Image: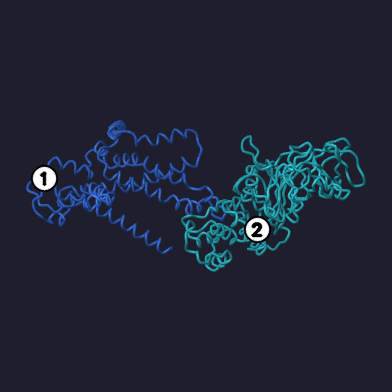
Chain colours: A blue, B cyan
Amino acid sequence: MPFVNWLKRHFVVIAGLLTLAYLLLPNVVVTVFSFNKPKGRFNYEWQQFSTDAWKDPCGVAGMCGSLSLSLQIAVWATLGATLLGTMIAFALVRYRFRARGAVNSLIFLPMAMPEVVMAASLLTLFLNLGAQLGFWTILIAHIMFCLSFVVTAVKARVMSMDPRLEQAAQDLYAGPAQTFLRVTLPIAAPGIAAGALLAFALSFDDFIITNFNAGSTVTFPMFVWGSAQRGTPVQINVIGTAMFLVAVALVLTSMVISNRRTKHKA
Amino acid sequence: MKTNDSGSGDVRLTGISKTYGSFTAVHPLDLTVPQGSFFALLGASGCGKTTTLRMIAGLEEPSSGTVHLGDLDVTALPPYKRPVNTVFQSYALFPHLDIFENVAFGLRRRGIKSVKKQVEDMLELVQLGEQARKKPHQLSGGQQQRVAVARALINHPKVLLLDEPLGALDLKLRRQMQLELKRIQTEVGITFVHVTHDQEEAMTMADTVAVMNAGRVEQLGSPADLYENPHTTFVANFLGTSNLIEAEVDSRSGGDIVLKAGGGKLVLPEARCSAPTTTGGKVLVGVRPEKISLSHADDAGEIPEGRNRITGKIADSSFIGVSTQYVIDSSVCPEFEVYAQNIDRDARLVPGADVVLHWSPAHTFGLDAAQDIDAGIQEETAV
């Protein structure tokens, strides 16, 4: 039974490849269908190869506007949530204050709450305050739900930090500001970066909360959802593929950089 | 940066104390560390030695008292304004910086631009020139330890504080680093204040040792002085091993005190007794295990006159190589320890044999009997 033996020996590799295929198949489909030339309004059946959509990615009315809005919101939400979340994380780890335990648990509530509940209650809140729904309400909502994730990521990093490192910095003539900039921040940086990445991804593709609180403003996920009712332009696949490629490129660059750094050091 | 004003570089602690809530870590304490000396704070964990060190560094605020470096009162200065540097326990090297930048850190923070030459020289001194571009986690424990020393020393501090710097190293490396640190201290002439729980380490390295117990300095002196003339049972038991016998003052003859202990008489030079000696009063008589000679009971007649003697029975013996350690069961002390050099081994000295212990009265010391006789006896710990 040479085949069975071969299968036994390579079982782990085969299982791994299958899992990877399972994970990546949707991306492959999106990419393939970005080169489709559909008949009619729906891009669900393969017709013939074409690069029309790639040549004119903004050819669909309103799509690139919604994309740019989503990117802007994601950038601002990431900045806001990372800044606030990092400060909250430091406060929770470093300081002993009244109700610290309560704050510690409350900060995770948004993660546990069903998104649709949060979306509806936020809308109620905004309406009662008489707020104009749009860019700002979306941004406020996004910063709010990204916060818990940033706090979690940064807190883990700050907790594992040896307090003696900051004492050593002070002992070596670094004042409080220098200590924070030269020691605390660089050591906490991986946690902060992880939190920021998470916040960006969460904000960019959020649909439920945004849909409730956007008013007449349309973000990219809302645009995709809306057009899926009436017909899906191939350009959606083009944007999806492009986003995927950008993410892959970023990961590869960071891997190359860190590889080169370790080789250089060794 | 080096200080030349001799005599004014002392570290002076005046009435310094530290309390946390109702717990007193350090009782009000006066201590002067002379400039250029190698000073050790020795004690078990929790005795207040690290807290004392951190108050000198400025990392801990004293509840009372003052810290002077030379003529400068630094009590209110934050750590980054004190001319003092610390080698931390487990080193606290900056993980995100390479070895060069770790060592250059203090210079850069003081705005010194051209650090290359100084850092390279310092790395040469600790034999790490090749490792300058590695990250701390790529070095061995001993190398990391040397980086920590280099990072502190490059700033030419008035005082170098060392907080259990060798605690994380294995025994062989620790012995090596003890000599290395001692060499560096002699070479640079900076005052070293070294905190340790290892009495051998303190005695090997330091000129002066302060033995701390429960937030107080029990005794201060040179290693030999502390070992030969302990003033408390804690010091007697914590530094090496002591045999302590409860005795009663009987009479005096010349400069000697004659004591009664379990039917026999012991002689103690008055100068070596730190306790009040009224006739009939109690005193603890101490003698170190290596000062004692062991004779078989059959040879008792050959022991010279004038020596203190005690009879007993060998309970246990263990052969160490250079010496044999005996535990003797006697009427005055159930576990009398004797270390005998293996020069001429007497085959009759086996467990169960009747023996006579004898030693010169000059090697006897006296302690106040109103103390815990077992204070400072350490649990056997793997060091």
- Under mark 2, the amino acid is Lys
Across and down, in percent, residue B313 comes to 76, 41
Q: Residue furthest bottom?
A: B117
Q: Are the residues tagged 2 and 1 within 8 Å (C-beta)?
A: no
**Residue B382 versus residue A27: which sits nearer the camera?**
B382
Q: Are marks 2 and 1 on the same chain?
A: no
Q: Which of A70 and A237 is in front in this view?
A: A237
The quarter of the image holding the N terminus of chain B is bottom right
Q: Tell me the amino acid under the disc marked 1.
A: Phe
Q: Residue A236 carries which label?
A: none
As helix, strand or loop, the secondary structure at mark 1 comes to: loop
Residue, far right: B254
- Quadrant assignment, res B286: top right
Horizontal and vertical percent position of residue A238: 18, 52
- Residue under the point 27% across and 52% down: A10
Q: Mark 2 points at which residue?
A: B158
How many marks on residues?
2
Chain of the residue where label 2 is placed in the rendered structure: B
- Which residue sits furthest left? A39
Q: How crowded is mark 1: few (under 14 residues within 10 Å), some or many (20 or more)?
A: some
The chain that hosts pointer 1 is: A
Calculate the distance from the C-alpha at mark 2 to the C-alpha at mark 1.
79 Å
- Which of the pair A230/A258 is nearer the observer? A258
- In the rendered image, residue A253, in percent from the top left (x then y), is placed at 32, 58
Crowding near pointer 2: few (<14 within 10 Å), some, many (20+)?
A: many
The residue at which mark 1 appears reads as A42
Judging depth in this view, the residue of B363 and B37 nearest the camera is B363
Left or right, B316 with reference to B58? right
